[in-house]
Image: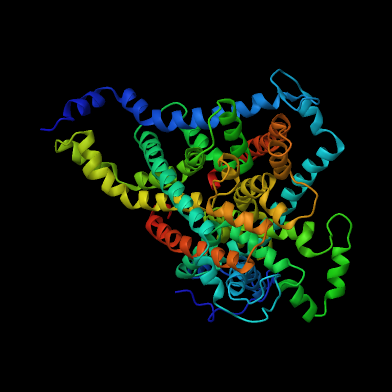
Amino acid sequence: MHALRPAADWFQRHPRLALALLLGLPLGWMVVVYLGSLGALLVQSFWSLDDYTGQVVRSFSLGSYAQLFSPANRDIVLRSAGMATAVTLAAAVLAFPLAYYMTFRASRRARLLLYLAVVIPLWSSYLVRVYAWKLILAKEGVLSWFVAHLGLDGALQAVLGLPGIGGPSLSLSSIGIFLAFLYVWLPFMILPLQAALERVPRNLLDASSDLGAAPGQTFRRVVLPLALPGVVAGSIFTFSLTLGDFVVPSVLGNSSYFIGQAVLVHQGTSGNLPLAAAFTVVPMLIMGVYLIVARRMGAFNAL
Amino acid sequence: MRSDPGTPARSSVSLKSSFPRKRESIFSRAGPTAPRGWGLTLAAAATLAFLHIPFLVILLYCFTTDDASYTFPPPGLTLEWFGAAWQRQDLWRALALSLRVGLTATAVALVLGTLAALAVYRSRFFGREAVSFLLLIPIALPGIVTGIALRSSMGMLEIPYSFWTIVIGHATFCVVVVYNNALARLRRTSGSLIEASMDLGADAFQTFRHVVLPNLGSALLAGGMLAFALSFDEIIVTTFTAGTGQQTLPIWIYSQLTRPRDRPVTNVVAVFVVAVTFLPILLAHRLSARDHD
């Protein structure tokens, strides 16, 4: 009938081999290209840089990891983790009302439109969206104009004067970085949260109210616990993406580095690939632990 | 169906006196727990505004006459930056490279993602969950991890950075998008269709060609477009895998941010990028909407 028939029959009789053929290419690619590269990265993190020649020494050393604990590098790690935490918490707070509204208040049609309104920013250019914040936060930019016209200049200066999070202007401060991060990763929080709320059985809510719970109580004791896996699922993205980003802090930040920038600088200009690799292991470890905890909390079902 | 105006106003979450009966909640999808006050609507609207106002700001700045700073409101409006952008050769080169990388990476991702989805769909095997997980990690881990991992392995193997090294990086994190779309569609496809085809004498290849593939078509189109959008926009992994002088469009934009030259031209390009990705994204979600219902 046609030439492939014998081959097809043969696969029919050997399902395992057919599976291997299907899976071979994609799995091979991921294992060789991706896991192989992660392995190479790990290996290099145990190499070291010869201080005199500036050459990478290919023998086992924990030197790069030791360097991570120098005060300057430790600050970078803590700064990045702190920012990731702050962004994640703020994203959860901002995402909740919208996700809740989409699920319980909006009509079917409105829900679809709102869904698109969340998805489109998520997929449209990340770089452009970061850039938008440069325009908004610039000293002579949009936000300053509104602040000045609302007579809030004093308040803005007071906030910028705060040690640690302030700076000479919004676009050069941690607040600016925080806002941009929050903005670019927010959709990643809204979508899984909305999916989790969608799965809350309506009759549970009815049961709760029939048993005499006030709306507020039902919200706290029924909706919130059931929504938590969604928040955790969203936080995987907001946390991870913030932790490894170098674009936002270099477009908006001042001279204090985040992990992403440190990795970029060490592998690039200073040629210290082992230290860059060791730096990268930090977010990998943090995310590893994070994913395990998230799995326990049922976040993977909410993805 | 839902008759909000008809139901008695319950102004806040904590009004204990408003104790809704069950019958009521059958009709209002909201159920008895939905906070009904303006607070929720306002908060939701605020989040929505936060998500969208920045796009309007960029759009406005395309037309500003101010080319040295970011003055708001713009001192005047002009169309000259569109012409200026048109004439930038470096911009066209970056766009061409991004298109080539995006199309090639999408093609690779389509093949790999479809194969993986078919494998996971048609058989149960040890480590099936692990496959999904393995495909997901390149986008779940920070981009910088994927980027520097690829760079260090390419460095160790002394592979020169080129067009192909960019494609390898992009394809790696694009596979999951195609895979997810294809798998969702396969799970919705009824198995009886495939059985009918086999019973009527079609072999596995014919069934794939005439039954499975046409069924998958729009899901693959959706996955492909999303993969392309992902690649077209990627900067972090690209920074590590691109050779010197290889500028994709995001890298071009990034270089403009740190070394501004004709700032409004960057704004025009930014709006162009958003506009170009808007339709495919919309279309992709239309095509795959039913799969994720």
- Residue at 64% across / 64% down in the picture? A132
Q: Quadrant of residue B265 in the image?
A: bottom right
Its colouring scheme is rainbow
Q: Is B29 placed above or below A3 here? A: below
Farthest left residue? A1
Q: In this image, B234 relative to A264: left or right?
A: left
Residue A32 image offset from top left, x and y in percent: 50, 27
Whether residue B3 is visible: yes
Residue B34 image offset from top left, x and y in percent: 60, 67
Count the marks. Answer: 0
> Which quadrant: the N terminus of chain B?
bottom left
Residue B2 image offset from top left, x and y in percent: 48, 74
- Residue at 51% across / 31% down in the picture? A33
- Residue at 54% across / 81% down in the picture? B5
Q: Quadrant of residue B145 in the image?
A: top right
Residue B73 image offset from top left, x and y in percent: 69, 79
> Which quadrant: the C terminus of chain B?
bottom left
Q: Quadrant of residue A135 in the image?
A: bottom right
- Residue at 42% across / 33% down in the picture? A26
